[in-house]
Image (tube, rainbow, N blue to C red):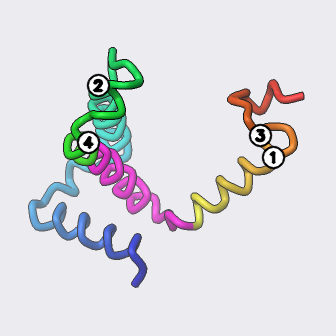
C-alpha cells in the first residue's frame, strides 16, 4: 500500500467510525473543500510578503490538511487514483506550458506567444 492509499484508508476509517459518509455527497464535499480553502486563504489575507514568511506554520498546516482531506474524500467518492489524475494533469500542463514558452513567466497558456 502506498502513502496515498494509506492516507485515504485512514481518513475513510475516521469518517466511517463516525457514520459521516451519509453527509459526504459530492456537492457538500466540494463546498467543504472550498470553505476550507477559504480558511487557508484567510491566514494570508492582508499580509505583506514579509508577514506571510512568518505565518504560524501550525495554523497553515492545519488548514492545508483540511483542504487535502476533502480533496482525498472527493477522489475516493469518484474512485479516482490520486497519483494517476495528478500525473495526467501534469502531462496536460506540460503541453499547455512548454518550458521554452513559459519559463520565468506567470502568463496564462492562452496568452503565451
Identify the magenta region.
Answer: 63-83
Image quadrant where residue 105 sits? top right
Estimate the x, y position of residue 93 in percent, counting from the top left: 71, 47
Query: In the rendered structure, which disc, 2 or 1, sits on the residue that comes first in sequence?
Result: 2
Query: In the rendered structure, which disc, 2 or 3, sits on the residue that comes first in sequence?
Result: 2
Q: Residue at x 78, y 42 (%)?
A: 96
Q: Which residue is at the front of the view, 76 or 68?
A: 68
Instruction: Tell me the distance, in whole angstroms, between the alpha carbons under discs 4 and 2.
Output: 10 Å
Image quadrant where residue 12 sits? bottom left
Q: What residue is disc 4 on?
A: 63
Q: What residue is disc 2 on?
A: 42
State which mark lies toward you, 2 or 1.
Answer: 1
Estimate the x, y position of residue 104 in percent, counting from the top left: 73, 35
Above or below 101: residue 113: above
Which quadrant would the N terminus be assigned to in this image? bottom left
State which mark lies toward you, 4 or 1.
Answer: 1
Image quadrant where residue 43 sits? top left
Specify whether residue 79 is painted magenta.
yes
Q: What residue is disc 3 on?
A: 103
Disc 1 + disc 3, Cβ < 8 Å: yes
**Would residue 110 be found to the left or right of residue 24 on screen?**
right
Q: What residue is disc 1 on?
A: 99
Amino acid at each position: 500500500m502506498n502513502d496515498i492509499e494509506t492516507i485515504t484508508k485512514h481518513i475513510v476509517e475516521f469518517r466511517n467510525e463516525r457514520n459521516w459518509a451519509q453527509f459526504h455527497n459530492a456537492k457538500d464535499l466540494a463546498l467543504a473543500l472550498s470553505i476550507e480553502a477559504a480558511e487557508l486563504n484567510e491566514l494570508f489575507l492582508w499580509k505583506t510578503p514579509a508577514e506571510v514568511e512568518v505565518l504560524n506554520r501550525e495554523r497553515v498546516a492545519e488548514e492545508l490538511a483540511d483542504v487535502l482531506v476533502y480533496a482525498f474524500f472527493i477522489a475516493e467518492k469518484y474512485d479516482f487514483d490520486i497519483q494517476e489524475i495528478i500525473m495526467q494533469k501534469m502531462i496536460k500542463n506540460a503541453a499547455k506550458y512548454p518550458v521554452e514558452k513559459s519559463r520565468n513567466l506567470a502568463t496564462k497558456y492562452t496568452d503565451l506567444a
